[in-house]
Image: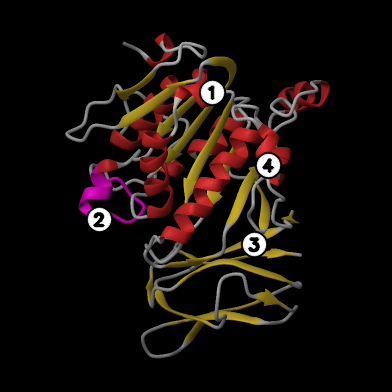
Amino acid sequence: MRLSDFKAGSGVKQTLPLPVTSPYSVEMTVICGSRPGKNLVVTAGVHSCEYVGIETLNRLKRELEPAALSGRVILLPLVNPEGFYQGSKQTIPADGKNLNRMFPGKPDGTFSSQLARVLEETLYPEADFLMDLHGGDVNEALTPLVFFPASVPESLSAAASAAGDPLSAGARPAAESLSVPYRVASTSQNGLYSWAAQCGIPALLVERGDRGLWSEKEVAACRENVYELMRHLGILNAASVSPCLQQAEIRRAVYEEAPADGFWYPAVSAAGQKLKQGTLLGTLKDSYGNEIARYTAPFDGVVLYYTLSLGVKSGDPLIAYGKL
């Protein structure tokens, strides 16, 4: 059976394989509520060492039951199982590509590009809203945050403005409903969630956990974020909504990347650290200690995430920070 065969209101819960050719099965669990409603797709494991989202959806696929839902919830806990089982950081071992840079996909491309195409063709037509779960990888310190698309095609933006329900109003109100401290406007367009937004599907990317670790506390918080979105969309009864953590919006974020191979020395002490204009963020040096680049904050802001690795190659992310 195909995903489209499972309809909201049917009260069915079923796990299906994604139609992709791979030694590792990519599974999706569809939970069809007992009443009609919105269709929510939630993915995790695009980056296979970002464990909080993976464990959260593994639990939710067992926990959620049709009787409690209106609409459909489609869960993909492990989009990149090959990377997960082989311990690959951010890439798919089959071709060494970062899946979150491969959208839109190509049917005749490398495996990652083909997988991106299958995800588009299978999930996007079924989604009224898409949520992609990420976190800090093994070499990243990160503070919890939610990315929402800063821009969509003008025709889609106009349609969203003209409509009245929370779904059509776009991703920003949904981001505001989540208990995370920072809401970051993103201009990315080539990832699973950001390409969905370019295709007219409201979408968010949530970041939780860091250093390639997971904890019961972070999984519980991530679970609550998924529940908050389901309540926002009317998939779950909103009567039990709890007060949301006060959230700051970041409209300007800077993502520093290494201009050359080198040794990275961050000067900040923690993700979430507040910054004053002129604060030293870190330096990149060669193996003789000669400075290649020095980074300072051009404005007051906050550290969103930064790389912990001593060795970095040209183009690697070093630090991301936002203006408050």
Q: Residue 3 at x, y = what percent?
A: 39, 16
Q: Using the rendered view, name the quadrant where residue 57 is placed.
A: top left
Numbered circle sitting on residue 139? none
Residue 232 visible in the picture? yes
Which residue is disc 3 drawn over? 254
Query: Are the residues at dot 1 and dot 4 in contact (C-beta closer than 8 Å)?
Result: no
Q: Identify the amino acid type marked 1.
A: Ala
Query: What's the CA distance linking mark 4 and mark 2?
Result: 37 Å
Which residue is disc 4 drawn over? 241
Residues 71 and 197: in front is 71
Eye-nearest disc, 1 or 4: 4
Q: Residue 21 at x, y = what percent?
A: 22, 26
Residue 189 visible in the picture? no
Task: Identify the residue at image location x=51%, y=16%.
Answer: 34
Task: Identify the residue at image location x=39%, y=67%.
Answer: 139
Q: Using the rendered view, name the quadrant where residue 282 is placed.
A: bottom right
- Crowding around mark 4 (Cα neighbors within 10 Å: few <14, some 14 to 19, many 20+) is few
Eye-nearest disc, 3 or 4: 4
Q: Identify the amino acid type marked 4.
A: Val
Which residue is disc 1 drawn over? 127
Q: Identify the amino acid type marked 3.
A: Val
Eye-nearest disc, 2 or 3: 2
Q: Quadrant of the C terminus?
A: bottom right
Query: What's the CA distance linking mark 3 and mark 4?
Result: 33 Å
Eye-nearest disc, 3 or 1: 1
Find the magenta span and give its range. Answer: 82-93
Tell whether position 89 is magenta: yes
Disc 1 or 4, which lies upstream in sequence?
1
- Crowding around mark 2 (Cα neighbors within 10 Å: few <14, some 14 to 19, many 20+) is some
Q: Residue 125, relative to residue 87: is it above or below? A: above
